[in-house]
Image (cartoon, rainbow, N blue to C red):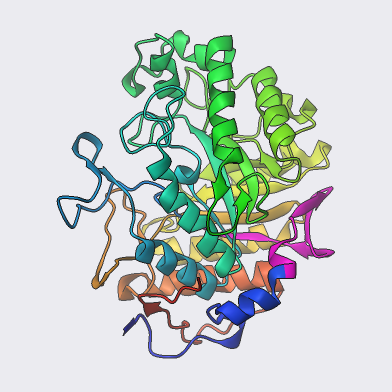
Amino acid sequence: MKLLTLLPLLASTSLACAGTIKQQDDIRSLPITRNGTTLILNKKPWKAVGANVYWLGLDENVSPRSPDQPYYAPTKATYPTQGRITEIMAVVKAMGGTMIRSHTLGISVGNPLSLWPAPDQTNEAAFAPIDWAVYQARVYGLRLMVPLIDNFDYYHGGKYTFLRWAGFNLTGKESSNPQVQQFYNNKTIVNMVKRYISVLLTHKNPYTNLTYAEDPTIFAIETGNELNGPVWGDMNVPTKWVREIGQHVKGLAPRKLFVDGTYGVNRTHFAVDEVDIFSNHYYPVSIDKLKKDLNTLSTVDKPYFAGEYGWLGNAASADANLTAWFRELEASPKVIGDTFWSLFGHNVPDCDTFVEHSDGFTMQYGNPAHAAQIKLVRQHFVKMSKGLSIADDETLPSVPCPAPTAR
């Protein structure tokens, strides 16, 4: 068993065992609720801090280990191993995180390995890694935020998949075509999306015997990832669509929090009662932009979540920028959390090789090149979630690979 660092895990971030899970089932079975701009767990304020781990349900970064492993070559899609999923849960816990935002736990349409390879055709095999991820999050005492639709035309599908299914022959390269608004306004597409959501939320996880709608491990459902209209940054996501999707989600899962996944804070969505949380993304981190977002939200009694940010910052001043960014997030009573982009681990069962991704924002716990930033992130998570300060020279907790599971 390989260790990512030299010291054992601290008590505050110790890995879960079966006995611990049973003792803490009362907490793990409680929902996260909202009181104005504060999230509540077990009658106490709770912060949503963690990582974006977009690949938990379907990955694009590793080659299959054997000919019988499911693989879709055109998009390099394959299912992550259970070991990779479990290791990430252990890492987020060691970093002081409380949750994970993961696209492919909810966005999975349009290729043979998806939940919906075609309209109204459910691929039950695609639920296996999602079931495991939800279960392992519960094992490690973490919560999950699940987006439903991607604004882009990626391997896991999204807005353009539904458009093509409805007869609009568009790809992500035609994002400025006014017809992309048919995704929000075309009743056939809207109803198709709602049926997909129903399939997702009513699925029963064999590890927990709970549907995704019932399981409080999934604490929040997000309309989508960086949703926009035909003009980049236009925030042209119709209020009517947000309300209809919100009502559908709340009808199936009334105890879930509902997040507006528009790329930017859209004032017109303040009128949507179903929306619990507003958010935005930051590349690079920008305190001015954050302040503008918070000022926009000042007229509504709802909280703010920084859903993505580039942890690398700006060149030589990256660490200073990141530190200042964290202090700003920690100081605002409206900010209920944040998730950096993005976290990867080892190619488990290979514990000697990190999985790589090409966007330049790959964080790997245990990689010496990332140690300084990981310490900053961990200090921020612990400050947000526990109100505690961690010394700069404190050694990072160790995480074994493969990480332990409890069945």
In this view, the residue in front, 140 or 93, is 140
Q: Is residue 78 above or below residue 92?
A: above
Where residue 18 appears, as percent x and y from the top left, is: 57, 78
Q: Which residues are magenta?
A: 26-51
Residue 44 in view? yes
Left or right, 180 with respect to 110, comes to right
Q: Is residue 32 magenta?
A: yes
Image quadrant for the N terminus? bottom left
* Count of labels in the image: 0
Where residue 2 appears, as percent x and y from the top left, is: 31, 82
Residue 186 in view? no
Where residue 102 appears, as percent x and y from the top left, is: 49, 49
Q: Residue at x 40, y 16 (%)?
A: 165
Q: Residue at x 45, y 58 (%)?
A: 311
Q: Is residue 8 above or below residue 17?
A: below
Q: Quadrant of residue 88?
A: bottom left
Q: Is residue 210 above or below residue 108?
A: below
In this view, the residue in front, 393 or 4, is 4
Q: Residue at x 47, y 57 (%)?
A: 132
In this view, the residue in front, 8 or 328, is 8
